[in-house]
Image (spheres, rainbow, N blue to C red):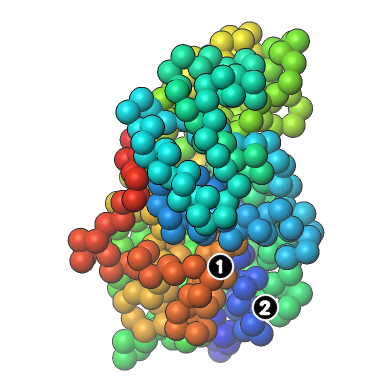
Amino acid sequence: MAQIADVIIIGGGIHGASLAFHLTKRGVKPVILEKNFLASAATGRSSGLVRMHYDLELESRLAWESFQYFRNWDEMVGGDCGFTRTGFLQFVSPGYEAQLKANVAMHQRIGIPTFLVSADDVHRLAPHFKTDNIQIAAYEPESGYADPPSAAKSLMEIARQRGAKFLQDCTVTGIQVKSGKVTGVATTRGNFSAPIIVNTAGAWAAGVAKMAGVEIPVDTWRHDVIFIKHPLGMGPSHPTVIDNPCSMYFRPETGGLTLVGLEDNNPIGEDPDGYTDRAQSGFVERAIERICQRIPVMEKASLHSDHGGYDGISPDQRPILGQYGPQGFYLQCGFSGTGFKIAPAVGACMAELILDGAAKTVDISPFTPKRFEEGKLIKGEHSYEDIWH
Ligand SMILES: Cc1cc2nc3c(=O)[nH]c(=O)nc-3n(C[C@H](O)[C@H](O)[C@H](O)COP(=O)(O)OP(=O)(O)OC[C@H]3O[C@@H](n4cnc5c(N)ncnc54)[C@H](O)[C@@H]3O)c2cc1C
């Protein structure tokens, strides 16, 4: 006998947890099926950057709505998401200053606290930075980073208190479709039936979609990071930074550490079950060389640790959100390495789409899975080109 649920969510990362949280807020009781354990994949490996600077208005809106959760987590969700305000700087490559100005103006129209700063201002905010390849930057004084596993845990915990069922060590092996509608799933822990199934399977999303007879253009994207220990006597830490001229991002971490990730050479198409406990060969050296270009004093830093992770990436590096294929089958995937900071608002929007037929928190219709076959790939209004290259 299949167990019956209102909605089946496949994947217990931040997106499965956020959707469960928002569905249960409306009295709907989902079952969330996770093949491993909560936040065991991209969410558990995420760098957790929380900023609103995007070159696409809709993503900035999703990030801004989500920011209301991060900064009022206990009130809006309950518990703690580890949000740490560090300030955020966006550096762009030479030649992209006009786009930066236009994007900051767009963010200010949304209401995001952000403004342009000069290279001298950057130097005042972060005295250790070399600023010779920067004329201007965008600054978000309220932004920072959060702790993704804690965020997923509190969203899932509240969802469970409201009646959601979360099953771990439970792999979905098949999706049943009858007369063009999804009816349930087969798993390693028995069968479940529901008229609505949501694919929040991250780097495994294409394989899960195939179980419903649907091809989706989600590939796997591997991303490695390092933590380095500041040299003795470095003094104050630094803001969180996306540093396009150096093809990198970095942020402070407690304990006198800095986390560094690179925008280039993130392998596409690998097996998402690959080894991620350490970064791939050669990455540590490249990341250290890169951070020393921006913060020369880091030449005296020491390696603390390194790891990798896999997310799903779409052809335009933007999320894939909406109904697709059999009736009742929804996609909430393709987050392309930037999906943590928008997860609260995306969960709210997907719950609205599923229950009301359209999202009202933010219009997510441009993220439709149909855009690829219609040739309507998304590009930022004042584009910096692809984040990952
Ligand atoms: C190293 C790294 C750093 C990142 N840094 C940032 C950042 O700074 N800021 C930011 O916003 N984003 C960042 N991201 C991206 C962000 O972490 C992801 O977009 C986000 O966590 C995706 O969440 P998810 O719930 O969709 O996927 P996941 O967390 O990957 O969850 C999907 C889950 O589905 C499960 N699953 C798969 N197949 C099945 C099946 N058949 N049956 C049952 N369960 C299944 C998996 O076990 C997994 O737990 C980073 C990603 C990585 C890898």
Can you tell which quarter of the image residue 124 is in?
A: top right
Residue 223: image location, x then y, percent: 46, 38
Left or right: where 224 falls relative to 85: left
| Cβ at disc 1 under 8 Å from ligand 1 | no
Q: Residue at x 43, y 18 (%)?
A: 133
Q: Quadrant of the N terminus?
A: bottom right
Can you tell which quarter of the image residue 181 is in?
A: bottom left
Q: Residue at x 38, y 32 (%)?
A: 97
User: Disc count in the image?
Assistant: 2
Q: Dot 1: few (<14), some (14–19), or many (≥20) neighbours within 10 Å? A: many
Q: Residue at x 71, y 47 (%)?
A: 83
Q: What element carries label 2?
A: helix
The dot on residue 347 is: 1
Q: What residue type is labelled 1?
A: Gly
Camera-side residue of 109 and 312: 109
Residue 116: image location, x then y, percent: 52, 35
Camera-side residue of 158 and 237: 237
Camera-side residue of 53 and 162: 53
- Residue labelled with disc 2: 25
Can you tell which quarter of the image residue 241 is in?
A: top right
Mark 2 and mark 1 lie on one chain; the one further toward the N terminus is 2
